[in-house]
Image (spheres, rainbow, N blue to C red):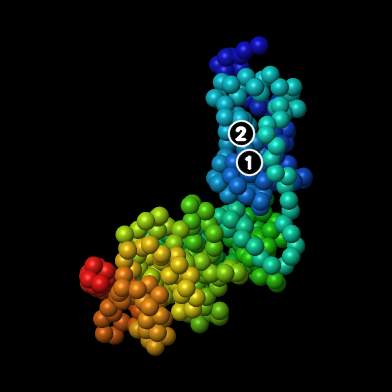
Amino acid sequence: MVLAPARVDLPALKAAHPLGDVVEASGVALRAGGRVRQGVCPFHDEAEGSFTVYADSQRYYCFGCGAGGDVLDYLQRREGLSLPTAVERLAGAPAAAGTPAGPPATPFRPSAGTGQPRRDPAALRAAARHYAGALRRSGAAQDYLRSRGIDPDAAGRLGLGYAPGSGRGHCLPEALAAAGFSRGRLRGAGLLLAGGRERFAGMVVVPEIAHGRVTWLAGRAVAPGAAPRFQALPGPKPVLGLGRLGPTPPWAVVAEGLFDWLALAALGLPAVCALGTQGLGRVAAALRGCPRVVLAFDGDAAGRSAAAHLRALLGPRAAALPLPPGAGDVAELAARPGGRTAVLRGLAAALHTAGELRTTP
Ligand SMILES: [Zn+2]
């Protein structure tokens, strides 16, 4: 029997085939329980279980790859069907018994309770979205960023967020519970501290985004005098910004601190952040093949020493960003009146130097 989609009662057809049943019949195991169920996404490579089926809306969404839709979208994507064929397939399947099984999928594996926080891109992506929404609603956090030279447009482009940490509907576990993330999973992702408090409470949150996926988060306290001033997810630090640099940038700037990097990235410059003066080998390795590198480290002894070290690792393609007298670092310079022009002028000079050194062995 071949049914033309126009003659099919789509709402009735969908009602007869609950999304969760169709998903499971296609070989994706969903964690049991409740109105929100999760499993390993069949559309991207993961082990975390970011694929989420909502019983109330009969829609799915993957926090890992962003795939989403209703039961017909699912069938089309899962089995590579056109809409009419997906309708036909669903109409031909026994009601509430799903569809013929697709290729076998990875069974859902709950997180191993090893105590060692692991990267959970889906949870990080959901958290970053929540925090970005909170930043748009927080005048205080926006004012803080503005005082550091980051306007709301740049904050939006960079995916920045704010973690209010308390207040009805504002805390992360509450907000993400609705999307199917348990407190245990958020703790496993490093987003909650052992006591249950949010790691980034009261902080502006900066995501590392690579290939559209949130892979790491760092935070800076908004209130003056708050301790700690900085927080980051546990585990190895990334070279922040590397994921947005593209495969073959003609040049790149290396910043020392989070806000130095934000100032450069807010200007649309190809910048990465060493996140301090340690572990410079990984920065040099990350920039292997980049023809010209400008080093924008602080003007203090630690910054000068780190810049010298990195310059030795990178060779003649590297040059230092000159800081005008009285400016301790790039963030300070960029937040001054006329600072943006000073940063760009310094970069032009440094790139010229690095280029000359490169072509004059
Ligand atoms: Zn996915």
Q: Position of residue 263 (x, y in %)?
A: 36, 68
Is 83 situated above or below 244? Answer: above
Amino acid type at circle 1 is Pro
Q: Is residue 308 visible?
A: yes
Mark seen at residue 202: none
Q: Nearer the viewer, residue 176 or 32?
A: 32
Q: Which residue is mark 1?
A: 42
Q: Nearer the viewer, residue 106 or 32?
A: 106
- Secondary structure beneath dot 2 equals helix
- Can you tell which quarter of the image residue 19 is in? top right
Kindly identify the residue that appears in the image at 52 percent across and 75 percent down.
230
Q: Which residue is mark 2?
A: 78
Kindly identify the residue that appears in the image at 57 percent across and 26 percent down.
81
| 339 relative position to 17: left or right | left
Circle 1/circle 2 CB separation < 8 Å: yes
Amino acid type at circle 2 is Arg
Ligand 1 lies under 8 Å from the Cβ of mark 1: yes
Is 241 situated above or below 329? Answer: above
